[in-house]
Image (cartoon, rainbow, N blue to C red):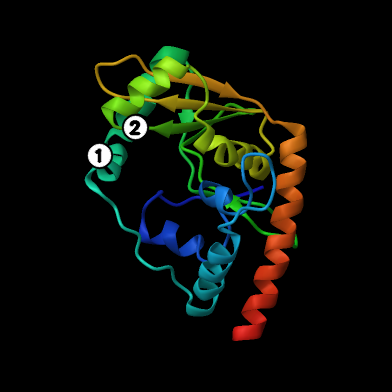
Amino acid sequence: MKIIQVDQGSPEWHSCKVGIPSSSNFDKIVDSKGLPSKQQKKYLNQLAGEKILGYAEGTYQNAAMIRGIELEAQAREVYSFITDQEVEQVGFCITEGKTIYGASPDGIIGKEGLLEIKCPQLSTQVDYLLANELPIEYWQQTQGQLLVTGRKWVDFFSFYPGLNPLLIRVLPDEKFVKSLKIELELFCEQLEELVAKIR
């Protein structure tokens, strides 16, 4: 794994991610069972376009998304206090070798761990607390982070000020990670072929 040390959300961070599949979008490559996603073609086209243009389209941010970004630093402090763990912030982590894909975890912990923070709306946080498990919509992202970084676990931390946080430790699912890696390699091959075709 190689770490590109830039501030997440900065122009430099957006620039280094151009045309590279990243874990927050791995649900567009595989579903939660490791099978090809129905969104694969659209995501493939998007990344191919980015590779040719050299930049990504601007992404829409609603009020809830902006609020989540603003609360992330507070959530990280609360996590550190609860767990007594020091969190190192990182930019963009990418694989090294022929097939390149990446992840932007919200922190690296020690030599084995990662941190993924979510700051959802109030009703969503209550849902998460009642379920007391990793929300399925973040399965591909967290497993993908583990694949990219080679780390042994990722702590999923959902935070809303005034409510209890949700802390779930996610371990690698070997069967899923194997399927994800195969699909990512195929996806990256298709991406290069598509870029060559439309360039």
Q: Position of residue 60 (x, y in %)?
A: 31, 57
Q: Residue at x 75, y 45 (%)?
A: 179
Residue 83 vs 109, above or below: the answer is above
* Mark 2 surroundings within 10 Å by alpha-carbon count, few (fewer than 14), some (14 through 19), many (20 or more): many
Q: Position of residue 71 (x, y in %)?
A: 28, 33
Whether residue 57 appears in this view of the structure is yes
Instruction: Give the number of the disc on residue 78.
Output: none
Please state the horizontal and vertical placement of residue 132, each as a whole percent of the image. 48, 16
Task: State left or right for residue 2 relative to residue 115.
Answer: right
Q: Which residue is mark 2?
A: 119
Q: Nearer the viewer, residue 106 or 119?
A: 119
| SS under mark 2 | loop
Q: Amino acid at mark 1?
A: Arg
Residue beneath label 1, please?
Answer: 67
On the image, which quarter does residue 147 sit in? top right
Are there few (<14), some (14-19), or many (20+) residues within 10 Å of tag 1?
A: some
For the residue pair 181 and 87, the one nearer the viewer reads as 181
Q: Are marks 1 and 2 in contact (CB under 8 Å)?
A: yes
Marks 1/2: CA–CA distance: 8 Å
